[in-house]
Image: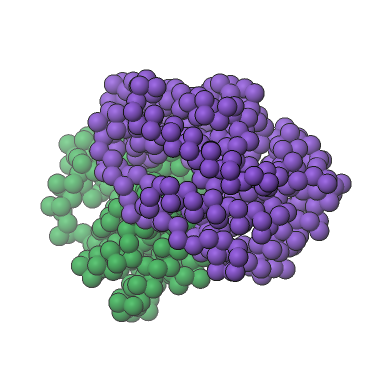
């Protein structure tokens, strides 16, 4: 018989806002830990949404909807998650921004919602972020990963400029750089010296996990 | 012998010209002006924040040089002769508008007008003819057109511009561009607050039609209308049919005598069969889309424009790669006419070396003689 977390995960897969919020509250009322509701309910539901996206039954609008619903559910969980934080393990820290000249944040926001829902600590720099602003944020927040997004062909060179600026500031070797966005591709990522290209927001989550795992495998970046 | 512009028009009408038309959108803000690095190819000094009249002069000089340097190519006019939607709507409803300092220039918003889509009910279309801002823009448009007429005399065979009645706009995506909502809010709203999203698009559609009519009052007639709207890239088929198709069709119907062109660099193969229903005559195909598959689906219903990859191949490939790709695209899409070779989207700032543009032009002439 499915428990409340199974039902919760299915509500999210169905993109049912009210149902997801009701079952999140119900889970808390039944004594589930917030981190359990997140991992066994919402994150699992997001996996289901991702599967449908991969099968092309869901499209970006549906991913956005799912991330919005998770955001709403997180407002119910945030306080308890903070209280539980000492007991759980942070996956990694990401500094994320849309590059200079580009005002589009659609992909970035979905990717951030997914990363946060999976336990990443994400610093969102917003849109139109200059290379210098990325460098400043890296110095301040000491992230494991710098993630960049762009929607416009005309702003693509900004990604390479960020990689160069990080190298120039002596910061490049200590972190991973991943990029994504409509005009990007694997060859472009390699050319500018990024560590990884993410085809979709879901892919971004997968890649972030793989990058951190690879670092554990080799000691330190 | 047909001019490059005549070839473009024949292709838009679904016909076979003498050879495949070649169109390169040489706007000041995309990568083409980088050709300035080659002698006598372009102009220098473009800055989106400079005085508009000075900017216009630079754009005109660039276009004249470009058209003379590449006589085989049809290109776009100097400055935009479409009346921009501008941030008028958002400003009218009390939004703060700021100007961004970037290569693209233009306006931006500190926050969206509608934080909550449920506020969409308060949106009303202003009477644009009474707006001072619109009046000023119409004057600017008249000035641009007048300047173009003088500067492009003798180049009519190479230019697709406002002088020949070309105009353009966004429609559904304008809700985001004009600062009403953020993209994410719009997308999730289609599922969670559909009636509010309909209300917002309804207002925007009316605004777009009014703006284009004002534009038409300056141009004389809109005979070619390009609707540039990427929002379908992110939609399911049912969302496209519900939230996009009816509104865009309405705009196209409002200018029923025009040739209707749809521009979207995103991947929408799943939707292309529906484009003729929206009264489109032509579709600018993005680089990620297999233009051969589009041709299989739409047949002769749409003129296809595209789709040489401007992201990777054009800037980084060698001339031989580019010639082979042009040949491949022509083989897939040019048969029977109704095809224009172009880039699949605007070239980026760090554009291709000149030899690659020349390879594109050379290959088009070599492999594009009809019948192909």
Res. B357 image quadrant = bottom right
- The front one of A81 and A95 is A95
Toward which corner of the image does residue B13 lie, by quadrant? top right
- Image quadrant assignment for residue B185: top left
**Percent x, y of residue B314:** 62, 62
Tell me: B43 left or right of A214: right
- The color scheme shown is by chain
At which x and y percent is residue B229?
A: 51, 38
Chain drawn purple, letter? B
Q: Residue at x 87, y 46 (%)?
A: B371
Residue at (43% x, 47% y) in the render: B53
Tell me what residue is drawn at x 59 percent, y 69 percent. Answer: B38
Horizontal side of B312 relative to B133 (left or right) equals right
Please tell me which residue lies in front, B348 or A163: B348
Quadrant in the picture for the N terminus of chain A: top left
Q: Can you name the residue that lies furthest to the right here?
A: B371
Extreme-front residue of the structure: B150
The answer to whether one can see residue B48 in this image is yes
**Residue B349 percent location from the top left of the image:** 49, 60
User: On the picture, is B63 further left or further right than B204?
Assistant: right
Q: Which of A30 and A147 lies nearest the eye of the viewer?
A: A147
Look at 49% across and 44% down and name the residue there.
Answer: A53
Count of picture labels: 0
> Which quadrant would the C terminus of chain A be assigned to in this image?
bottom left
Residue B102: x %, y % from top left: 37, 55
Q: Is residue B84 visible?
A: no
Chain A shade in the render: green
């Amino acid at each position: 018989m499915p428990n409340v977390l199974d039902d919760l995960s299915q509500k999210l897969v169905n993109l049912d806002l009210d149902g997801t919020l009701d079952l999140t509250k119900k889970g808390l009322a039944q004594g589930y830990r917030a981190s359990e509701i997140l991992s066994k309910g919402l994150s699992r539901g997001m996996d289901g949404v991702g599967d449908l996206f991969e099968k092309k039954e869901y499209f970006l609008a549906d991913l956005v909807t799912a991330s919005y619903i998770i955001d709403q559910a997180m407002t119910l969980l945030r306080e308890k998650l903070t209280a539980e934080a000492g007991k759980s393990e942070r996956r990694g820290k990401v500094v994320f921004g849309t590059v200079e000249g580009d005002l589009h944040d659609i992909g970035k926001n979905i990717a951030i919602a997914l990363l946060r829902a999976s336990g990443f600590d994400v610093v969102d720099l917003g849109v139109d972020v200059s290379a210098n602003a990325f460098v400043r944020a890296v110095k301040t927040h000491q992230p494991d990963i710098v993630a960049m997004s762009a929607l416009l062909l005309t702003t693509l060179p900004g990604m390479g400029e960020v990689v160069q600026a990080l190298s120039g500031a002596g910061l490049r070797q200590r972190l991973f750089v991943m990029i994504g966005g409509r005009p990007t591709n694997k060859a472009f990522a390699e050319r500018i010296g990024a560590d990884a290209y993410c085809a979709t927001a879901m892919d971004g989550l997968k890649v972030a996990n793989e990058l951190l795992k690879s670092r554990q495998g080799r000691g330190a970046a | 012998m047909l001019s490059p512009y005549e070839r473009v028009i024949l292709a838009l009408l679904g016909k076979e010209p003498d050879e495949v038309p070649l169109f390169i959108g040489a706007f000041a803000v995309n990568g083409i002006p980088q050709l300035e690095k080659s002698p006598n190819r372009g102009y220098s000094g473009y800055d989106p924040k400079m005085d508009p009249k000075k900017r216009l002069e630079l754009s005109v000089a660039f276009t004249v040089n470009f058209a003379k340097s590449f006589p085989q190519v049809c290109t776009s006019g100097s400055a935009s002769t479409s009346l921009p939607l501008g941030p008028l709507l958002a400003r009218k409803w009390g939004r703060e508008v700021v100007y961004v300092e970037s290569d693209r220039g233009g306006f931006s918003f500190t926050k969206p007008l509608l934080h909550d889509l449920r506020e969409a009910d308060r949106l009303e279309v202003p009477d644009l003819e009474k707006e001072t801002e619109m009046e000023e823009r119409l004057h600017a448009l008249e000035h641009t057109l007048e300047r173009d007429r003088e500067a492009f005399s003798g180049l009519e065979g190479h230019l697709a511009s406002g002088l020949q009645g070309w105009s353009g706009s966004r429609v559904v995506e304008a809700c985001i561009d004009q600062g009403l909502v953020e993209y994410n809010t719009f997308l999730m709203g289609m599922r969670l607050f559909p009636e509010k999203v309909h209300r917002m698009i309804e207002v925007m559609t009316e605004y777009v039609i009014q703006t284009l009519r004002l534009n038409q009052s300056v141009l004389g007639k809109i005979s070619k209308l390009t609707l540039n709207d990427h929002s379908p890239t992110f939609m399911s088929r049912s969302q496209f049919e519900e939230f996009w198709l009816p509104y865009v069709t309405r705009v196209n119907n409002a200018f029923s005598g025009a040739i209707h062109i749809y521009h979207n660099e995103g991947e929408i193969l799943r939707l292309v069969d529906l484009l003729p229903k929206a009264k489109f005559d032509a579709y600018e195909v993005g680089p990620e889309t297999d233009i051969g598959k589009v041709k299989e689906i739409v047949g002769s219903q749409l003129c296809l424009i595209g789709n040489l990859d401007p992201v990777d191949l054009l800037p980084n490939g060698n001339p031989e790669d580019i010639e082979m790709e042009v040949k491949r695209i022509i083989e897939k899409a040019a048969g029977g006419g109704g095809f224009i070779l172009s880039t699949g989207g605007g070239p980026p700032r760090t554009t291709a070396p000149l030899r690659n543009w020349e390879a594109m032009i050379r290959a088009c002439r070599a492999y594009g003689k009809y019948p192909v």
